[in-house]
Image (spheres, grey):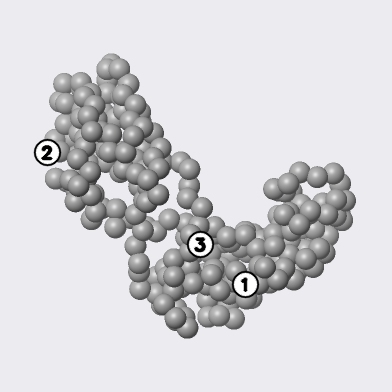
């Protein structure tokens, strides 16, 4: 079997739960462990094709935790087929007719393993929190730096975004500067552990993007944060 593009499919999304362990160019004190980051809720697309592009197979694969999204398969004027259970499948025949069935789980694992393994590792997102009015991490967040470093070290060519935020206490200008200082503080913590600065992009969003809505000049610990996205 080979993977092909299918022009007859108007909407396709397959949920997958694969991850790979890769060799890192960064060293750690021990073997880097995978960090359990939130999984995206939107499905991703993988498609298994047969001999001809007009004769296609769509299979819904579960994530590692067993959950699935949903796929709508439509071909020409045929009725839409909704796939919303693990290994639910749709066969699109040359005539454009869509036939739904359940794909064999063991066969699916064999057929998709190579392609899923070749996909990039999913992005991981982390949140660190800060003391009020400072670029100093809370004690709980201090311990998270090593977990973030382990995730970065597990990737062969990482891209890291560090985005600082502030609560509603103070002026917009003050919080713009403070949020950027917080992001730069995290960058310094990572570079001190051997992550090249060129791999880390920093930004400050001030008080524009609170996770908890508050009135003006209200302190909110959840809004005093830095978001780290590792790709």
Which comes before the other along the chain, label 3 or label 2? Answer: 2
Left/right placement of residue 130 relative to residue 187 reads right
Number of the front mark, 3 or 1: 1
- Which of the two residues, 69 or 23, is positioned nearer the viewer here? 69
Residue 185 visible? yes
Quote the CA–CA distance across marks 3 and 2.
38 Å
| Mark drawn on residue 230 | 3
Report which residue position mark 1 lands on: 143
Residue 37 is left or right of residue 101, and the answer is right
Q: Residue at x 65, y 63 (%)?
A: 128
- Sequence-first tag of 3 and 1: 1
What distance separates the C-alpha of mark 3 from that of mark 1? 18 Å
Q: Secondary structure at mark 1?
A: loop
Check disc 2 and report the residue beneath it.
51
User: Which image quadrant: the N terminus?
Assistant: top left
Residue 203, quarter of picture: bottom right
**C-alpha span from label 1 to label 2:** 53 Å
């Amino acid at each position: 079997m080979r993977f092909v593009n299918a022009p007859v499919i108007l909407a396709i999304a397959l949920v997958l739960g694969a991850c790979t362990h890769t060799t890192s160019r960064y060293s750690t004190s021990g073997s880097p462990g995978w960090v359990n980051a939130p999984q995206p809720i939107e499905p991703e697309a993988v498609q298994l094709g047969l001999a001809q592009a007009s004769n296609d197979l769509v299979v819904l694969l579960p994530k590692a935790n067993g959950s699935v999204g949903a796929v709508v398969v439509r071909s020409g004027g045929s009725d839409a087929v909704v796939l919303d259970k693990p290994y639910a499948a749709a066969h699109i025949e040359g005539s454009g007719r869509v036939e739904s069935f359940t794909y064999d789980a063991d066969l699916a694992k064999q057929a998709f393993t190579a392609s899923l393994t070749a996909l990039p590792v999913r992005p991981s997102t982390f949140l660190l929190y800060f003391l009020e009015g400072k670029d100093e991490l809370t004690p709980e967040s201090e311990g998270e730096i090593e977990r973030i470093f382990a995730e970065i070290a597990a990737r062969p060519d990482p891209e890291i975004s560090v985005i600082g935020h502030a609560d509603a206490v103070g002026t917009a200008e003050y919080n713009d500067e403070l949020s950027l200082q917080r992001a730069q503080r995290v960058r310094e913590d990572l570079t001190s552990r051997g992550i090249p600065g060129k791999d880390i992009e920093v930004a400050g969003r001030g008080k524009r993007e609170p996770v908890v809505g508050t009135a003006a000049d209200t302190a909110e610990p959840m809004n005093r944060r830095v978001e780290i996205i590792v790709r």
